[in-house]
Image (cartoon, helix red, strand yellow):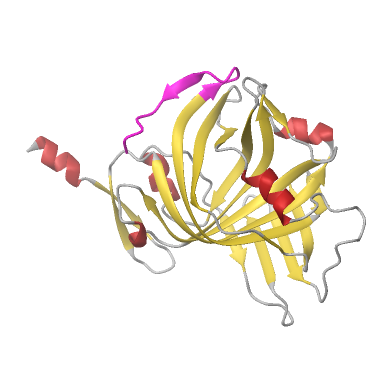
Amino acid sequence: MAQETQQLETLDITDPATGRIWEIPRRLTRNIMADVAERWVANIEISEDVCHRIVTPPFLEPIPVNGRHILSLCAIFMRHAAPTWAPLQLGPPSHNCALRVACIDQRDASQAVWVDHRYTDSHLAGALSKLGFAPVRPHLVVSRHPRGGKQHLGLRTLDGDITLNLIETSNPTPQIPPPPLFHDRDHFADYFLSGVRSYGPTDNPDQFTVVDLTKLRIGSFKDMSTMRGTLKTPWGTHPCNSVYRSRNSLYRWHYVGEVDRTGLPTHTTNTAA
């Protein structure tokens, strides 16, 4: 009887927009599936010094492109997201974003990613972290309303760390200085999609989260050369050098655990859930 009672325990989460109450089983959650409607990536150029200040694990080395260092904002708009133990179509839609730097793991020369900030507007984010998934900050606001008949993408975090403003221009202007970071969309895709493992900060500066992203279905990236704007981060405000968008992807995130400054595990998770 005690075991049956434990299985029935839930976390009750109220959606502030609709008033709907989500009853989330108290079940270990290390894997999240997502049906992705759109993935936007805005790239800015930063100095080598700033890039190395952002990427704090000693075993990760940022990857420059043609000698230039890149910080990317990845915005993922999900139709549905749910733990792998639940039907995907029951998961609510959400907007999500992360600041990321592509890196080389110097221990084995594999490609990896440093993800410095993760945000969502999903009201279920707090519940997932309580169930064992990596923490995501729940303070994201997204605006998609057209302005003057032009496509617009606005994104900001309530802590003030990130603001993205993109608006469609009349014509693409690929030749304005500085030169684009990537030769074309294939060059960008090769850079951006390489690597499975990502590392991120924790409250302890000597420990890092580890999350693996498996791309079960990948939408092709389109060069959104008509979108222009700026990206504000904790390291300054920069014009977006290039913007890309993909559609209709299927992803799975697996929270592996935490590692120390040498990359050795400090906390191993159960991969079954």
Query: What is the x, y in percent for residue 24?
Result: 30, 51
**Where, by quadrant of the figure, is residue 80 drawn?**
bottom left
Query: Vertical placement of 235 versus 37: above or below?
Result: above
Query: What is the x, y in percent for residue 190?
Result: 68, 46
Query: What is the x, y in percent for residue 102?
Result: 68, 38
Taking the image as drawn, is residue 243 in sight?
yes
Residue farthest along the front direction in this orientation: 186
Q: Nearer the viewer, residue 66 or 159?
A: 66
Q: Residue at x 65, y 22 (%)?
A: 59
Left or right of 231, for residue 32: left
Query: Vertical placement of 117 versus 153: above or below?
Result: above
Residue farthest along the bottom direction in this orientation: 149
| Residue 152 drawn in magenta | no
Query: Vertical placement of 164 versus 133: above or below?
Result: below
**Where, by quadrant of the figure, is residue 224 drawn?**
bottom right
Q: Residue at x 81, y 76 (%)?
A: 170
Q: Nearer the viewer, residue 16 or 58?
A: 58
Query: Vertical placement of 136 versus 247: above or below?
Result: above
Highlighted range, magenta: 259-273
